C-alpha cells in the first residue's frame, strides 16, 4: 500500500506540473513560425511561475554538474555550464524585453518581486564553490586538453568570470560581495524607475497659438495629436521624449519656453521629489567602490576597464582628452558664430544652453543653407528601412520578408524573416518604431533568442529593434530627422551582429568588450549618408523624387556642422562618468557640487550641458556602461577607421572587405579579443585620424 502511494504521488505531481506547463505559454514549446515568443498568449501572471520553474531547472542543471561523479572535463563541466539555464534565458528575454519595450504597470511590480529572486539565484551559482573548483580544475589543465582556439577562450572566460566575482576569495568576503550585488541591482532598478517616472511626469501644455511661434507644421500637428490623446483637445502638448523636446528646442522662438523644457530635461531625477535620484546614485557609487576594492581594484573604473580594449582608466582619460581639446576649441568657435547672430538680430542677451539648438539651426541655415525640414520629407520611416535593407543586401546579400503570421506584442510592431545570401533562414527581426508611455526612451536592439548551437545544430536568433520615432501625423507618413535616420542604421548594425554571430558557446559567441560593441552599429551610420546610398532610399514622400544632388551636396558639407558641440557634450558626459567611478564618494557627497566641480575641471563652457546629468544618466545606472560611456567614441575611432578601409578601395560595398568584416568582426568574435579580430579585418590597428577628420576637428 505504502509503495503504491509513493508511486502515485510523483505521478500526481507530474500531472499538476504538466497542467501548469500547458497553461503557461512561457513553459511550453513555442509552435509559432521559427519558434518566436507567442506574445498573444503571454499574460502578466505567467512570469512569476515561469521564472520559478526556470530557476528550479537551472539550479538542478548546476547541481548535476557539481555532483557529477566523474572527474571534471571540458564537456562535463565547461560545456554543461555554458549550456545551462536555457529556460532562464527564454523567460528572461521575453520578460525583460517587454519590460523595456512595452511594460504594464504590473510588470514593474513583478520586476521588483523577481529581481531579488533572480539575483539570489545568480549569486548562488556565481558563488558556488564546488562549481568553481570543477571549473578551476579544467582551467588548470587547459593546456593539456588539446582544445581549439574557441574552446580555450571559453574556458578562460568562464574561469575569469568566477574569479572577477570573487570565487577565489575567503568566504566572509564572498558573503559581503553577495550582499553588495543584491543591493546594487535593487538600486539600479529604482534609479531607472524614477527616471521613467520623471520622463513621463513632465508635460508642457500650450493653449495659445502664439506660444507655437517658429515651430514647423508637423511638430505642431504632432503636439496637437499628443494633447488630444491625453484629453487636452484643442491644445498642444510637448514632453521629454526626443521627438518632442528636440524640435521644440531647435525651432521654438519662445526663449522662456525653451528654457522651461530644457531645464525639465536636465533636472530629471534632481527635483527633490519622490523620484529624486541623488541619494540613490551616491549609494550606488559607494557600493561599486566597495565591491571593486574587495576584488582587489582601486575603484570601479579600474575593475571594469581591465576587461576592455582600453585596459586602464588612464588610457581612457588619455583618449578622451586627445579629442576634448580640439573639440572644445571648435565648440567655442561655434558659440561665437551663434552670438554673432544674436547680436545681429538685436537680441540683447548672452547665449545660454537652451538657446544652443535654436541658434545652431540658424547657423546651419546661414552657413550651409540647410534646415532639417528640407531633409525630412525624403526620410520616411519606410524609406529609411528600405535604405538599410538595400545596404545590407549589397554588403552581405541579405533579403527580408515581411511575416504577418509571426505574433507581435503591439500592433505597431512588424516582423521580418531575414534570409541569408545562400537562401537559408538567418533570423527573425522585429521592428517597433514609435514612442509609447509603456516604452523606455531611446533606441536599442535586443534579442528574444540568441543565435547558438544545440546538439551541433544551429539555432537562429530572434532580434528586436526598438525605436522612439514620431508617428505618422494625419495623412503624412512618419518623417525622420537625420539623427533618427542614423539611429535606425545604428541599431540595425547591432542587429547584424546578432544575426551573424556564429560561435559554438554562449559565453563567447556574441560576447565582445563594451568598447567594441558599438563598432558594428556605428559603422552602419557611415553608409546612411553616402550620396550613392541616399540616392537609392531618400525619396520624397509626395513626389517619389530622389533627393536632389544639390541637397545631398549641402548635407555633405554640413556633416561637420555643430560637431564641436556634439563632441563636447558627449565627452563631458564620458568624463563625468569616469570621474564618478574613479573618485572617493561618501554618504554626504553632494551630487550637484561633485558634478559642477568635475565639469569646471574639464573647462566645459556654460553654454553646453553634458549630454546626461548625473541623476538621469541611465547608461551608468546599470552595470553595462558604468565607467564605460566612453565606449561610443572609442568605437567611433574603430568605425571611422574601418569605413576608411572601404573608401580606400573606391568601392563602398567592396565584397571582399564586406566578407572579411562579416567574418572577423561580426561572426567570429568567439575566436579572439576585439583588437585581434579587428586587425584580422583591417591588417593593422586603428588610427584616430579618420575620426578627427570625420568630425572636422582636424
Ligand atoms: Zn548602440
Image (tube, rainbow, N blue to C red):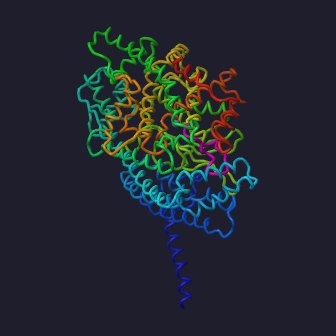
Compared across the picture, whether 561 is left or right of 237 comes to: right
Q: Position of residue 174 (x, y in %)?
A: 49, 58
- Above or below, comparing residue 124 to residue 415 in the picture: below
Compared across the picture, whether 435 is left or right of 154 comes to: left
- Above or below, comparing residue 85 to residue 261 in the picture: below
Residue farthest toward the left in the current orientation of the protein: 208
Q: Nearer the viewer, residue 159 or 617?
A: 159
Compared across the picture, whether 486 is left or right of 64 comes to: left
The magenta-colored residue range is 498-515
Residue 217 lies in what quarter of the image? top left
Does the magenta-highlighted stretch encompass residue 180?
A: no
Q: Position of residue 65 (x, y in %)?
A: 62, 65
Residue farthest toward the top in the current orientation of the protein: 344
- Counting the numbered discs, the total is 0
Report whether residue 101 is seen.
no
Q: Nearer the viewer, residue 687 or 635?
A: 687
Residue farthest toward the bottom in the current orientation of the protein: 1
Q: Which residue is at a point 56% across and 19% down the rendered structure image?
A: 693
Q: Which residue is at a point 51% across and 71% down the rendered structure image?
A: 17
Does the magenta-highlighted stretch encompass residue 511?
A: yes
Q: Position of residue 632 (x, y in %)?
A: 52, 33
Report whether residue 55 is seen.
yes
- Above or below, comparing residue 371 to residue 502 in the picture: above
- Above or below, comparing residue 165 to residue 600 in the picture: below
Q: Which residue is at a point 38% across and 29% down the rendered structure image?
A: 599
Amino acid at each position: 500500500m505504502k509503495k503504491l502511494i509513493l508511486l502515485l504521488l510523483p505521478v500526481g505531481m507530474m500531472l499538476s506540473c504538466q497542467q501548469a506547463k500547458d497553461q503557461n505559454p512561457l513553459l511550453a514549446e513555442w509552435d509559432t513560425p521559427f519558434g518566436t515568443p507567442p506574445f498573444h498568449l503571454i499574460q502578466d501572471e505567467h512570469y512569476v511561475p515561469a521564472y520559478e520553474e526556470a530557476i528550479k531547472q537551472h539550479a538542478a542543471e548546476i547541481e548535476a554538474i557539481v555532483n557529477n561523479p566523474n572527474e571534471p572535463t571540458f564537456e562535463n563541466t565547461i560545456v554543461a555550464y555554458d549550456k545551462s539555464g536555457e529556460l532562464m534565458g527564454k523567460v528572461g528575454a521575453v520578460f525583460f524585453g517587454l519590460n523595456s519595450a512595452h511594460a504594464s504597470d504590473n510588470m514593474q511590480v513583478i520586476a521588483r518581486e523577481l529581481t531579488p529572486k533572480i539575483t539570489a539565484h545568480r549569486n548562488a551559482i556565481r558563488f558556488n564553490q564546488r562549481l568553481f573548483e570543477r571549473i578551476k580544475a579544467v582551467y588548470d589543465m587547459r593546456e593539456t586538453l588539446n582544445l581549439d582556439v574557441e574552446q580555450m577562450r571559453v574556458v578562460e572566460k568562464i574561469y575569469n568570470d568566477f574569479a572577477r566575482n570573487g570565487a577565489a576569495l575567503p568566504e566572509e568576503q564572498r558573503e559581503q560581495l553577495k550582499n553588495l550585488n543584491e543591493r546594487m541591482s535593487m538600486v539600479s532598478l529604482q534609479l531607472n524607475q524614477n527616471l521613467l517616472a520623471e520622463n513621463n511626469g513632465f508635460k508642457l501644455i500650450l493653449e495659445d497659438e502664439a506660444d507655437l511661434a517658429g515651430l514647423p507644421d508637423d511638430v505642431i500637428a504632432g503636439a496637437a495629436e499628443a494633447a488630444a490623446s491625453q484629453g487636452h483637445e484643442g491644445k498642444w502638448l510637448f514632453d521629454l521624449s526626443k521627438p518632442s523636446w528636440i524640435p521644440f528646442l531647435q525651432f521654438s522662438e519662445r526663449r522662456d519656453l525653451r528654457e522651461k523644457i530644457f531645464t525639465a530635461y536636465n533636472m530629471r531625477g534632481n527635483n527633490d521629489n519622490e523620484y529624486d535620484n541623488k541619494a540613490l546614485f551616491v549609494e550606488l557609487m559607494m557600493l561599486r567602490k566597495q565591491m571593486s576594492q574587495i576584488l582587489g581594484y582601486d575603484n570601479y573604473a579600474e575593475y571594469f576597464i581591465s576587461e576592455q580594449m582600453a585596459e586602464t582608466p588612464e588610457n581612457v582619460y588619455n583618449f578622451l582628452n586627445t579629442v576634448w581639446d580640439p573639440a572644445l576649441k571648435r565648440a567655442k568657435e561655434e558659440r561665437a558664430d551663434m552670438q554673432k547672430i544674436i547680436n545681429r538680430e538685436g537680441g540683447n542677451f548672452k547665449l545660454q544652453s537652451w538657446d544652443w539648438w535654436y541658434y545652431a539651426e540658424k547657423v546651419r541655415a546661414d552657413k550651409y543653407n540647410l534646415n532639417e525640414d528640407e531633409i525630412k520629407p525624403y526620410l520616411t520611416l519606410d524609406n529609411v528601412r528600405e535604405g538599410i535593407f538595400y545596404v545590407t543586401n549589397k554588403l552581405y546579400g541579405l533579403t527580408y520578408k515581411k511575416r504577418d503570421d509571426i505574433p507581435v506584442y503591439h500592433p505597431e510592431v512588424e516582423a521580418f524573416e531575414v534570409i541569408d545570401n545562400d537562401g537559408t533562414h538567418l533570423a527573425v527581426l522585429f521592428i517597433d518604431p514609435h514612442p509609447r508611455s509603456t516604452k523606455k526612451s531611446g533606441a536599442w536592439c535586443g534579442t528574444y533568442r540568441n543565435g547558438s548551437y544545440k546538439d551541433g545544430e544551429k539555432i537562429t536568433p530572434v532580434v528586436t529593434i526598438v525605436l522612439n520615432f514620431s508617428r505618422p501625423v494625419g495623412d503624412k507618413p512618419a518623417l525622420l530627422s537625420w539623427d533618427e535616420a542614423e539611429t535606425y542604421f545604428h541599431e540595425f548594425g547591432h542587429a547584424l551582429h546578432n544575426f551573424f554571430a556564429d560561435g559554438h558557446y554562449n559565453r563567447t559567441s556574441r560576447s565582445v568588450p563594451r568598447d567594441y560593441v558599438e563598432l558594428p552599429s556605428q559603422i552602419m551610420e557611415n553608409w546612411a549618408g553616402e550620396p550613392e546610398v541616399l540616392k537609392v532610399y531618400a525619396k520624397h514622400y509626395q513626389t517619389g523624387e530622389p533627393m536632389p544632388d544639390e541637397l545631398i551636396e549641402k548635407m555633405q558639407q554640413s556633416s561637420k556642422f555643430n560637431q564641436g558641440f556634439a563632441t563636447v557634450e558627449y565627452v563631458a558626459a564620458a568624463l563625468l562618468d569616469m570621474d564618478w567611478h574613479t573618485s572617493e564618494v561618501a554618504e554626504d557627497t553632494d551630487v550637484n557640487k561633485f558634478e559642477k566641480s568635475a565639469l569646471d575641471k574639464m573647462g566645459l563652457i556654460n553654454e553646453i550641458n553634458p549630454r546626461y546629468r548625473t541623476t538621469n544618466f541611465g547608461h551608468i545606472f546599470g552595470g553595462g556602461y558604468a565607467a564605460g560611456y566612453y565606449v561610443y567614441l572609442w568605437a567611433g575611432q574603430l568605425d571611422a577607421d574601418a569605413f576608411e578601409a572601404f573608401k580606400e578601395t573606391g568601392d563602398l560595398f567592396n565584397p571582399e572587405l564586406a566578407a572579411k568584416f562579416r567574418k572577423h568582426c561580426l561572426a567570429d568574435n568567439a575566436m579572439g579579443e576585439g583588437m585581434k579580430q579587428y586587425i584580422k579585418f583591417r591588417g593593422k590597428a586603428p588610427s584616430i585620424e579618420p575620426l578627427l577628420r570625420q568630425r572636422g576637428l582636424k
